[in-house]
Amino acid sequence: MQNSIEISLVIPLLNEEESLVPLHQWISDVFEKDNHSHEVIFVDDGSTDNSWDTICSLAKTNSNIKGIQFIRNYGKSQALHAGFKLAQGKYVVTLDADLQDSPDEIPGLINQLVEQKLDLISGWKKKRYDSILFKNLPSKLFNFAARKVSGIHLHDFNCGLKVYRKEVIKNIDVHGEMHRYIPVLAANNGFNRIGEQVVQHQARQYGNTKFGPDRFFKGFLDLITLWFVDRFAKQPMHFFGLWGTIMLLVGLGFTLFLGIDKLFFNIQARLITERPEFFIALTLMLLGSQFFIAGFLGEIILRNQRKIKRYNIKTQTSST
């Protein structure tokens, strides 16, 4: 068999040296009972403590452990992306390294994924051991907004404990701060069989959270980006062309008003260029033209990309 690994665990981390040994032992205990072939991929996202030394030490005693080290902190999305590229298992599990996600949940999540024929299944930390004011309440507001915008009915988009089929993680690009929206990225790529299961949330034992309150603000901005790209990326003229046309028409309306008013009603009045309506008309027509051109260029780029894809498909077919 080319690939004998059934389950890949991808674990991003930052300064979690105290949690790594107990987490490794916890995972080992789970898979001793479950008896699935597996690999554990620790992705050190630029830790400044001894996390990498601990990973190297664990790898010497367990051949299932692999490690990736970033020379500086790039963020959780980049860490997951690197882990996904290395993962070989038929099913890919993500969980955080802070011991707040329980590895005991993994077999049950995989069973649900298989039985329900899902593309991915997400954990739902229904009962959380976090600050109500600074984490629980903002998290509920964030998840509510994400459900409304994306149309995906998950209660906990940001839960670190998720299970994917290998095809899902190999066909999505996780970058920026988009790790919160992996279910949305998957759905946008056609993997829309998404499930959810309640999982246990553990209280943090070591260290402090690595995410500040600004993550929710960034999360909302990323959500708007995803909504815009999903809705208009395939037909940019529908957005830019519409608003460009509206601005051009309103600007043209102001221009006609100024011309008619000057010619027939206020011939002796001040110059058109001294009136505020002139600057409104000029600004709207300039912006409208730019919006329209942006939509037009976007359509040209998309058409060229489609031609390249069709050409590649024909070339591959003819060579077989």
Image (cartoon, rainbow, N blue to C red):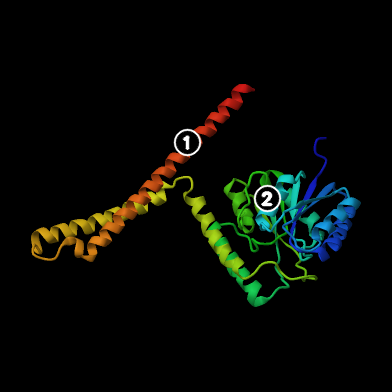
**Helix, strand or loop at disc 2?**
helix
Q: In which quarter of the image is the N terminus?
A: top right
Which image quarter: residue 264?
Answer: bottom left
Question: Eyeballing the image, is 198 above or below 249?
Answer: below
Residue 240 visible in the snapshot: yes
Depth order, front residue of 274/177 = 274
In this figure, what is the number of numbered marks? 2
Q: Where is residue 126 in the image (x, y as percent from the top left)?
A: 70, 68
Residue at (63%, 54%) from the top-left corner? Answer: 183
Which image quarter: residue 256?
Answer: bottom left
Residue at (74%, 49%) from the top-left corner? Answer: 92
> Real-space Cα distance between discs 2 and 1?
28 Å
Residue 116 visible in the snapshot: no
Residue at (78%, 49%) from the top-left corner? Answer: 8
Which image quarter: residue 282?
Answer: bottom left
Q: Quadrant of the C terminus?
A: top right
Q: Which amino acid does label 2 sit on?
A: His
Compared across the picture, whether 204 is left or right of 284 comes to right
Q: Where is residue 12 in the image (x, y as percent from the top left)?
A: 73, 57
Q: Which of marks 2 and 1 is nearer the N terminus?
A: 2
Residue topped by disc 1: 304
Label 1 Cα neighbours within 10 Å, binned few <14 / some 14-19 / many ≥20:
few
Identify the disc placed on residue 81. 2
Depth order, front residue of 52/88 = 52
Depth order, front residue of 129/51 = 51
Question: Eyeballing the image, is 190 above or below 128?
Answer: above
* Residue furthest out toward the bottom: 133
Label 2 Cα neighbours within 10 Å, binned few <14 / some 14-19 / many ≥20:
many
